[in-house]
Image (spheres, rainbow, N blue to C red):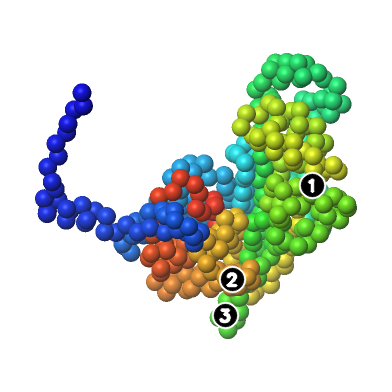
Amino acid sequence: MYGVVALSAATSTENLLALEEVKDFCTTDLGRGGKQRWTYHILEENTIDSELQRLCDPRSSNSVDSVTFQPCSEYATLNQDRHSIEEWDLHGGIWQFNAVYDGHCGHDTVNFVCKRLPAIIRMSLQGLLSGSAGKIPSSELVSEALTNAITHLDDSIRSDLFDFLPCDSLRRLSPDQLREHIRRHESEWETISARCTQGTTVIYSLLDPSKRNLWVVNLGDSQAVLGRKSPSGHWSGCVLNALHNGNNPLERQRIMREHAGEHTCVLDNRVIGYLAPTRAIGDTWLKIPSVYARRAFGAYIPDWISPSLVEQYASRILTPPYVSDVPDVYHFVFDTTVDRQESFLILCSDGFLDIYDNVNVALSESELAERWVHIVGSSLKRRGEQGLPGNLAFDLLRDAIGGDDIDLVSRNLTLEMDDKWIDDVTVLVQRF
């Protein structure tokens, strides 16, 4: 026998209240077409900045402003971006180090790199300074040390794997022997295998105590932009680095040249059809023989890649490595009489670039650079005139998610969707 629940009809007042509660809600198809729609909440202008601040953790030091942003509530605590802002007092002078790390496939590798890389660079720099009587070493020596820091750290991930499971041993072990070896060293295996199947890009800057020499080091698809103010007061922006991903034809050509005749080394602008960045720390399984993907990672990492895809990708690993750990290093010399107080550097993860694609702003890299520099330059002028504190990275983020377009900003901040609608975003702005 079924129970019956009797509900009285809503009163006119209750209907009006219900309509009032939903009047500020809209839906969007995110430009994808089709019937599916997602709901978002239109925010009041006076609440937008406070909501954005809550979501992006804006911070400011003496010379660096930062934000890191992931609005999707399902992924906000899983943001895989990291950053470093450090000052090192070495031989009586302050060196400034700033970095953005964009992790992918997990947190282990990006956490490892964020913790270890600054210390390696600092020790290398200290060694160079002690060997040059405290004077600034040549730019070539510093550039070499900055490159070696990345390759050394990436080598250590590979070495830990080879020490734990040499390639010859892996080929010889029976399935039962391999299973037992991993079982007996389960904790060590979890650490090593996570770092080998995850990865991170990194872009970082190093400024010497005189603020005359700037190095920018890039491995992956993050971006660095230098803003400079001319004596006439005009700001101009300069993109400092090439992006290392499959959309860059030079990177595609490099990989195909290194793997001549392998038609699957780049598919759909991804390394072996899998990874978008073409250079990174970690992603070790794409740098070593395919037996590791087949017998070790595919079999003993839960929820990594489905067995059919493991075999598909492994069949394309013929002449590793496919992902490079060699960064590009750029060195700039400032005229301190002109540039010292009239320049700044923007470092950002690729998610910041992607936002502009999401909001249908068709701008080239150089046009984006000019836009960002104009925004920061205007913010600096406003600060100087009004004497108000602010966060330059926050101003850039506000523009990226829609600027003065309240509807677009509201959509980017409040969309009700389980999947990410915006990639992880980190922006640093360093004032010189």
- Location of residue 120 with respect to 405 vertically, above or below: above
Q: Nearer the viewer, residue 348 or 94?
A: 348
The residue to which callout 1 is attached is 322
Is residue 54 visible to us here? yes
The residue carrying mark 3 is 234
Q: Nearer the viewer, mark 2 or mark 3?
A: 2
Is 116 in front, or is 421?
421
| Residue at the limit of the structure toward the front, as seen here | 1
- The amino acid on which the numbered mark 1 sits, given as a three-letter code, is Tyr
* Residue at image point 63% right, 70% down: 364
Q: Earlier in the sequence, mark 3 or mark 1?
A: 3
CA–CA distance in space, label 1 to label 2: 30 Å
Give left or right: position of 392 versus 369: left
Residue at the spot 76% in from the left edge and 16% down from the top edge? 176
> Which label sits in the foreground, 3 or 1?
1
Q: Earlier in the sequence, mark 2 or mark 3?
A: 3
Q: Which of marks 2 and 1 precedes in the sequence?
A: 1
Whether pointer 3 and pointer 1 mark residues with C-beta atoms closer than 8 Å, the reply is no
Helix, strand or loop for disc 1: loop
Coordinates of residue 291 in the picture (x, y in percent): 80, 32
